[in-house]
Image: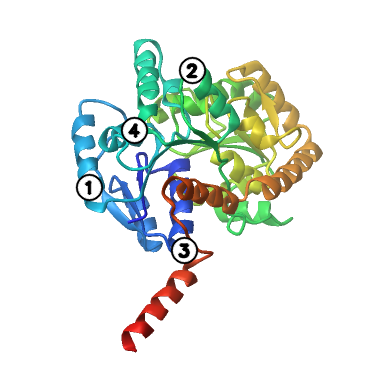
């Protein structure tokens, strides 16, 4: 086969990036498969795309199961014999590079460095592994230049390729003047409230604890303001315990676009990122955004398409949210600039093209403009058989 994608996790931004890539590659005639845990939403999406799913049982975090996961993945690679192995996120990067060990062209796509999530001896061990594993990595794809710089500064020696995430502008189409009210009506949200929305997995990386800390005085000053947290995760119980009355935990949703369209303001208080896909999706929805200055955020926003604040600065975060609540005209202007910037710089078709070019350089893979090329080839071959 041509390309084997390996991913753990199978949710959120990584899931959407993998699905976008395999959709594009299969439509262009490549023989593609995805090895990942049998998560229902991921496997259902692969079935809809007619892309082969190879069950690979793997936990999200490293631990004693790594050896078993590596051997299972090694068997998968041997059976499929792909021309390129594309590893997504740190766990697939760990097991995949141990399994392949340079025997097949290998692409590692960290989607945010794993060593940012840990401290002390665990961080030192994670960094040591990433430095060692570079010998089994033909290309490391970083989603932002800041992610690449951080990797290089911490001693990783790789062949780097910066390929920014993108969004499908046909799906995330330009909002209309009626989008906000329509979305609120569909979601049963009040039309007259000021809604701040935070989209992301409920975990330390995404910084919802910082946002809740900043929100308490905001809710006292602006009784008509509401905060909606869209997503689920391991920190939900802890966050709910400190949230006030004007905070709603929406949970995991498949209609994220509607929640973004319903928002007056999107808040992204992350402690670290690669280049947040949720940030790009919010920009595509024409949202006013406040985001922390972590990897990729400033690159996504440019000079004036979002309000960027220092990470973990609760006081500054609160002040900027309050300022935005009081400035509807500024929110509208930011949203228009955000939509224009996504259209110019972050179309996922460009992302997919750059990834295919990486494959081509590594293994000589060529793919046509769409599935019709493969169909035409099959038609000509069948004519030869008949003749």
SS class, disc 2: loop
Which quadrant is the C terminus positioned in?
bottom left
Disc 1 or 4, which lies upstream in sequence?
1
Residue beneath disc 3: 27
> Label 1, on which residue?
78
For this view, does 363 lie left or right of residue 264? left
Q: Earlier in the sequence, mark 4 or mark 2?
A: 4
How many C-alpha atoms fall within 10 Å of the one at disc 4: few (<14), some, or many (≥20)? many
Nearer-N-terminus badge (3/1): 3
The residue singled out by tag 2 in the image is: 154
Which residue appears at 45% of the width and 32% of the height? 202
| Mark 1 secondary-structure assignment | helix
Label 1 or label 4, whichever lies nearer to me, is 1
Q: Return the x and y of residue 55 as percentages of the image width and height.
A: 25, 49
Q: Read off the residue under disc 4.
A: 91
Mark 2, residues whose alpha carbon is within 10 Å: few (<14), some, or many (≥20)? few
Q: Is residue 73 left or right of residue 16?
A: left
Image quadrant in which you'd find residue 279 = top right
């Amino acid at each position: 086969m041509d390309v084997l994608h390996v991913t753990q996790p199978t949710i959120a931004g990584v899931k959407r990036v993998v699905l976008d890539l395999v959709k594009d590659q299969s439509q262009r005639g490549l023989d593609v498969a995805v090895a990942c845990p049998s998560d229902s939403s991921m496997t259902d999406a692969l079935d809809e795309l007619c892309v082969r799913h190879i069950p690979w049982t793997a936990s999200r975090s490293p631990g004693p199961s790594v050896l078993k996961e590596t051997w299972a993945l090694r068997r998968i690679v041997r059976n499929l014999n792909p021309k390129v192995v594309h590893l997504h996120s740190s766990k697939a990067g760990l097991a995949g590079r141990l399994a392949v060990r340079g025997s097949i062209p290998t692409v590692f796509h960290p989607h945010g460095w794993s060593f940012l999530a840990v401290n002390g001896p665990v961080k030192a061990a994670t960094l040591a592994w990433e430095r060692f594993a570079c010998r089994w990595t033909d290309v490391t794809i970083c989603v932002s230049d800041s992610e690449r710089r951080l990797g290089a500064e911490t001693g990783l020696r790789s062949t780097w390729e910066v390929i920014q995430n993108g969004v499908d502008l046909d799906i995330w189409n330009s909002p209309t003047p009626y989008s906000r009210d329509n979305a609120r009506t569909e979601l049963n949200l009040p039309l007259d409230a000021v809604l701040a929305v935070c989209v992301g997995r409920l975990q330390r990386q995404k910084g919802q604890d910082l946002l809740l800390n900043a929100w308490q005085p905001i809710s006292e000053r602006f009784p008509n303001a509401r905060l909606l947290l869209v997503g689920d995760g391991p920190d939900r119980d802890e966050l709910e315990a400190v949230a006030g009355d004007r905070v709603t935990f929406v949970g995991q949703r498949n209609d994220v676009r509607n929640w973004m369209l319903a928002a007056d303001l999107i808040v992204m208080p992350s402690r670290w990122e690669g280049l947040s896909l949720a940030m790009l999706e919010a920009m595509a929805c024409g949202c006013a955004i406040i985001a922390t200055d972590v990897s990729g955020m400033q690159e996504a926003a440019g000079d004036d398409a979002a309000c960027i604040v220092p990470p973990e600065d609760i006081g500054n975060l609160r002040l900027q949210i309050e300022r935005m609540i009081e400035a509807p005209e500024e929110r509208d202007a930011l949203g228009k600039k955000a939509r224009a910037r996504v259209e110019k710089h972050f179309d996922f078709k460009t992302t997919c093209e750059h990834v295919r070019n990486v494959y081509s350089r590594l293994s000589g893979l060529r793919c046509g403009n769409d599935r019709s090329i493969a169909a035409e080839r099959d038609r000509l071959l069948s004519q030869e058989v008949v003749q």
